[in-house]
Image (spheres, rainbow, N blue to C red):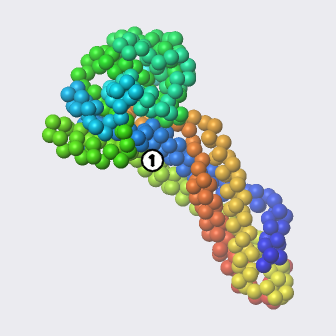
Amino acid sequence: MRLLLAYSLRNLRTRKITTALTAGGMALVLFVFAAVLMLDSGLKQTLVSTGEDANAIFVRRSAEVEIQSMVDRRQAGIIESQPEVLLGSDGAPVVSKEVVVLIALPRQGSGQTSNIVTRGVGAAVLTLRPKIHIAKGRMFRPGSNEIMIGGALVGRFTGLQEGSTLRFAQRDWQVVGQFDAGGSGFDSEIWGDNAQFMQAFRRDAYSSVVVRLASRAGFNSIKARLESDRRLTVEAKREGVFYEEQSRLMSGFIQILGVTLSVLFSVGAVIGATITMYAAVASRKREIGALRALGFRRSSILVAFLAEAMLLGMVGWVVGLSLASLMMLVKVTTLNWASLSELAFRFVLTPGIVLQSLCFAIVMGFLGGFLPALRASRMKIVDALRAN
């Protein structure tokens, strides 16, 4: 068997042009397949990493996103007074009552407008979200018209940079800092003081209330108590779960689109591999006859040609995945279908994607080589040796 595998590998090296063309077709399919999975992985990672599992978020019951939610001041006061809420060093609850509003800003260069999330936050916001840090400038001062911007917005929108002045909600806002949210969805937001945002946007209720739990085990008790409280109309979720749910609609669309394209392209690649392997069988009839005369079984011939086809798939996998990995250098923006705002994220290559693409390549090679390999294994020794 080792001799047959060496024989298959030698033939791939001998037929360089046909090997390159067939492997190139498979590489294209693998590139599309892996890139779509990386796109979906990047989207999920961006949204899921937006939330902290140690935090609980409260929104209006049945509200899927914060821009649809309203939590009035009385309800917010009840939420932050619960015993499960962590108290800071100053004895105050670690809570951020947040106001989330969409604004339209012109893009850099094109001038076309796009929706951006503005988030009014409380003083404890950085304690609630320890992954976020100030990259440039400083934190805005409570009670002022100062704002901070997420790093993903810099260079994409006109006037969004440290030291600039931005006008929205009939006010001028001074950009005093830029924060880094580690590639999460917050990187595509503008933050300011919640009280000032409520005044500017003429809101009398918060969009959400985010609390840090003293213990993660306390989530079920605070959720059950507040959701059954008749004074409240809120729903509690772990923050990570809340943002993960927002990725499901778009993630499902990407997966369906990716599978459809991959299947369509793979049909062409499999046909190409089949033609290549049929040509290889036709040109090597005497060699096949000689192998059979030397005592190699039909099953060994079948395995040898299948291995050759799957090696083609492996070559395509290496090339396709290598090209797809370069996509990690690219940052893309898209519309978050849940919040209707622009979201920036990167392609993410995971071990799972590497394994899935490898299996896909092997399957393509197997399908493309099975019929030619079956034909080679069924050749009669005499007929094969007589072939021209």
> In the depicted view, which residue is nearer to us: 127 or 2?
127
* Residue in the image at 65% along x and 45% along y: 325
* Residue in the image at 48% along x and 32% along y: 130
Whether residue 339 can be seen here: yes
* Residue in the image at 53% along x and 35% along y: 183
Estimate the x, y position of residue 346 in percent, counting from the top left: 56, 38
Q: In this figure, which residue is indicated by the disc labeled 1?
A: 251
Whether residue 110 can be seen here: no
**Number of residue marks:** 1
Position of 70 with respect to 353 (left or right) is left
Q: Quadrant of residue 246?
A: top left
User: Looking at the image, is 129 positioned above or below residue 27?
Assistant: above
Estimate the x, y position of residue 18 in percent, counting from the top left: 77, 61
The amino acid type found where label 1 is placed reads Ser
Estimate the x, y position of residue 276 in percent, counting from the top left: 72, 66
User: Looking at the image, is 75 positioned above or below residue 303?
Assistant: above
